[in-house]
Amino acid sequence: MSAAAAVPIRERAGKTFDVERIREDFPILRMKVHGHPLVYLDNAATSQKPQTVIDALVRYYEGENANIHRGVHYLSQIATEEFEKARETVRAFVNAAQASEIVFARGTTEAINLVAQTYGRAHVGAGDEVLITAMEHHSNIVPWQLLCEEKGAKLRVAPINDEGELLVEEFEKLLGPKTKVAAVAHVSNALGTINPLQKMIAMAHRRGVPVVVDGAQAVPHLAVDVQGLDADFYAFSGHKMYGPTGIGVLYGKQALLEAMPPYQGGGDMISSVTFEKTTYNKVPHKFEAGTPDMAGVAGLKAAIEYMNGVGIGKIAAHEHDLLEYATGVVGQLPGVKLIGTAREKASVLSFVVEDVHPHDIGTILDQEGIAVRTGHHCAQPVMERFGIPATVRASFAVYNTKSEIDALARGIRKVHEVFA
Amino acid sequence: MPELRDLYQEVILEHSKAPRNYKALAGANHKAEGYNPLCGDRFTVYLEMDGDKIRDVGFQGAGCAISKASASMMTQSVKGKTKAEAEAIFHRFHELVTGHAHGDAEELGKLAVFSGVSEFPVRVKCATLAWHTLEAALEGKQDKVSTE
């Protein structure tokens, strides 16, 4: 998306935030489900896409498609320029110091696996420890478990309280001489808790431990400044922040990326290959083997421009309003118990209803056109911590409205009627 | 459009609230555990076999209304049946909930209330979890059964 195309959005948003105008940017929101207007409250799973992102994908294939960093022909140059421009857009978005610190990956999951398989394998040995928290998504548990199994290292888990907040002092205690890396969520996908990341990173750095951040649920909702946080690695996905599926980002500090062995081998990640020896390309290309998702990168750039056009501050403020409203309206319904009541939360309302399984609630809400996630949210240890098999999770985005939350409340009342 | 009442029939709701044979059998000589990782449903089915015959059956666990009611009504329908008879009932039940029923649904007796499940394809595995677990218990399989 060109900078010029972003301007009208900014003008339209104006000084006041107009959610109805925002909704017009998302074609899927016109859809009806089972005869009801779609109420899409499953944004923590994946967000919907604005027309500008959809157009960026089409524009890429219609006018820019060629393989990057390879040809001398016109289209290859255009594609390469657009690809590297997008890297600069991402750099500015998370305030990285240099564009070369931005590695494109398939998503948060691949970005975390990349760190575990490169930095992790080079630095974690037998008897060492990797520290995570009790609120991690499976994608920030399993890559570290695999590493620990391979190396004979130990996975340590910092506990959370009944509100779903990290016990920061316990986290600090678990940072020991054997800790080689800490991997933590910025925002919990199942509970919505915002972790005090800056403080946690400072604690880890005092002990010389680098921190890998799962930012998948933070980037869509908060202004992220990787330098301000002093994060060593920060991973996020395009599809949860209005971008396409299949594209994500790993931010890594330049010095760390340079010292790391490569992840996958292939084209583009090399500077020269002979059968005797291969010299690797410089970062970030060293970590981008093979033809990347160039259309996805174009879409990610359009998504960032869309968010910048609306203003991340306005998005965060709107979602905060929605969450407060939903917490009040849904939290007061009979039999409803909120799971995750941290003081600092973003955009996620997880709850259970007395005597009704979340899966049944999901089916009944679906009949009203309401899309929520029901299940363990790829965070089974979190469910275990709260002694429940699953929750219903409503998660909000820039285009959600208070009347949609009212519809959710009506849907939950309907659950009571069916199960009365 | 699928109707909620077709899925959540009174009989089903009643069984989900007050499941029958909800117990671990002291004299169980066959047992299996079933798990649906998608929604976290988890059941254990206990069998007291007398040769080829199911002398007693019980279950325990947690799950949605559909899976719990299905487990409850399953125990009623297979008690006293032979292994082959129980497997035949499951076969017909499976056809019913997947919308492939042919012939007389009445053969299934009370289990016919699950016909509405076929309109909700994502719920088929809820309705069949206990049955798959029963099948595993009958076979004497030790592995955990999963409907994912």
Image (cartoon, coloured by chain):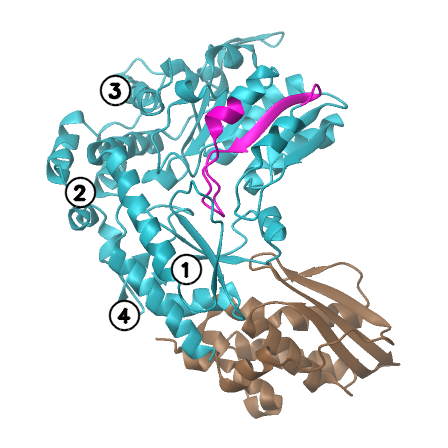
Chain colours: A cyan, B brown
Front of the two marks 2 and 4: 2
Do the residues bearing badges 1 and 3 touch, measured as CB atoms within 8 Å? Answer: no
**For residue A52, above or below residue A181:** below
Q: Is residue A210 visible?
A: no
Determine if marks 1 and 4 fall on one subunit.
Answer: yes
Chain-order first, disc 1 or disc 4: 4
Chain letter for mark 2: A
The amino acid sitting under disc 2 is: Phe
The amino acid sitting under disc 3 is: Ile
Of residue B42 and residue A207, the one placed in the foreground of this image is A207
Label 3 crowd (10 A; few <14 / some 14-19 / many >=20): some
Front of the two marks 1 and 3: 1
Q: Which residue is mark 3?
A: A78
Q: Which residue is mark 1?
A: A331
Label 4 crowd (10 A; few <14 / some 14-19 / many >=20): few
Q: How far is the residue under mark 1 from the one under mark 2?
A: 26 Å
Q: Position of residue A247 (x, y in %)?
A: 40, 33
Residue A17 tag number: 2
Determine if marks 1 and 2 fall on one subunit.
Answer: yes
Chain letter for mark 1: A
**For residue A89, above or below residue B83:** above
Residue A35 tag number: 4
Q: Is residue A410 left or right of residue A273?
A: left
Q: How far is the residue under mark 1 from the one under mark 3?
A: 52 Å
Determine if marks 1 and 3 fall on one subunit.
Answer: yes
Q: How far is the residue under mark 3 from the one under mark 4?
A: 45 Å
